[in-house]
Each structure stands twice: as C-alpha cells, then as structure tokens.
Image (spheres, rainbow, N blue to C red):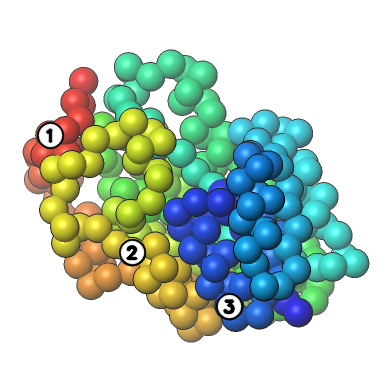
Amino acid sequence: MPIALVTGATAGIGAAFVRLLSSEGYDLVLVARDEARLKSSAAGLPGEAEIISADLSTTGGCQLVEQRLADDGRPVDLLVNNAGIGLAHSFVNNSIDDEERLLAINVRAVMRLTHAALPGMIARGRGGVINVSSVAGFAPMLPGHTYSASKAWVTNFSESLYTSMRPRGVRVMALAPGFVRTEFHDSAGIDMDKLSDWQWLDADDVVRTALADLRRWRPVSTPSVAYKVLGGLARHVPRPLFRAVTGRASKRIGRNPN
C-alpha cells in the first residue's frame, strides 16, 4: 500500500485529505497536536494508520515527523504539508510570539518536512509533496500581513521545487484555495459572517481537485474557476488598485486593518 503523511490531519482540508486518500487505498500517517483527536481520526479509517502527536511550531515537533519521513523501511509516498495558522489581528496588534509561531508553522515546518521527505523520493524516482498555500499568497493582503506573506513563500517554494524535482520523477505542488469551510477561521478568531456564499469552497472538493492536479503534474492547484480568475487578477492587477480593493474587502468580512 502507498503511504501518505498528512499534517494538520484532524480537521478541515487535512481531514479531507485523510478521507480521500484512505478511500484510494493509502495507508496514512496522521500528524497533529491533539493526540485524542488523532486517535479518534485513525480509528475511523479502513486501512492502517499511524499517528504522530507533534507541535510543528517547535524544533522537537518537526524532528519527530522528520524521523518518520526519513524511515526507508516504510517510505512515505506522498507528503501533505497542510498544517497552518492565521491570526485575527493586524501585524502591529499581534504579539511577536504569535507572529513567530505563525512563521514557524506556515514556513519553517513546510521547509523542514519537505527537506526530510525529498531525498528518499529522489532515490526511489517517485513521490509527491503537496504544500497547502492560499490565494492570499498571490498578492499583499490586509490585514493578514504575515499570513499572506507566508503563503507567498509556500507557493514560490513549491513552484521552484517543481521545476527541479520533475526530471527526477517527484511531483511538488502548491495547493492555493480560497475560503474553505473548515475550523480554520474560528480557530483564528476571524469573523467571516459577511462573506458571500459563492466565496466558500467545500474541503472535499478542494482535495479532489488537488489530487487530480498533482497527477497532471501541475505546479499550482487553485480549485474553482472563480478563484482561478481572482488569483490571476491578484498577480497582474496594478498594485495601487489591488491595495484599494483588498482594503475594502477586509472591512466586508468584519476585520479591522488597524
């Protein structure tokens, strides 16, 4: 059986990856902080499931997962770097500890786990890495200054690796969805009540598209036509205009850019 390791595996997009990959015959390695939720998630899977309780904001937590990724006895065929956090306030209103924790999970953990996974995949001439990013990384966003910057890093990092890994048979892709109905925004304390229905995506649909795009060797997957268009505009619209639009949008979803 192929093996997939999923971080942030007990909720949202991570849980959707677990469900769909399990249905495709993968054995799973589930990574999250909450051991009780990990055990509950693993118990409901038809195939074999390992669990790793780890806080990826810490070096020790990353090392636990890196050791599993480096295990040649039961090699991981697909790494899904899904764990990530956002913050409810703007940069100046967050503590520096919270800002550093965001970067540790959204950037450093992605880098470290990918670095641990790739050597074995290269040696085997196959494998895949999906790094969960966001359309927020396509251009500066308000007020999630560090969040959008962290996702820009994830997308750029993944596209760069895609270019160098493809000749070696290893797929690397950034998954850049828009707003997905998960626990993410509630956990961050972000009020999303003013968002329109069309802006919401279903986690299972996002993951189906991501897995299909990975198999097509696409470097970036942006589920839904609407977000593909918005993502393209974000990359190419003049920055002054884009800043004006995002400033108004941040007020619509009930967030104070100050």
Label 2 vs label 1, nearer the camera: 2
Q: Quadrant of residue 127?
A: bottom right
Real-space Cα distance between discs 3 and 2?
A: 18 Å
Mark carried by residue 138: none
Instruction: Give the mark, 3 or 2, whose residue is nearer the N terminus.
Output: 3
Indicate the secondary structure of the residue bearing disc 1. helix
At x 67%, y 31%, the residue is 58
At x 41%, y 68%, the residue is 204
123 lies left or right of 135: right
131 lies left or right of 188: right
Q: Three-letter amino acid code at disc 1?
A: Lys
Which residue is situated farthest in the right direction here? Answer: 73
Real-space Cα distance between discs 2 and 1?
A: 24 Å
Mark carried by residue 251: 1
Q: Quadrant of residue 164?
A: bottom right
Q: Residues within 10 Å of mark 1 (few under 14, many from 20)?
A: some
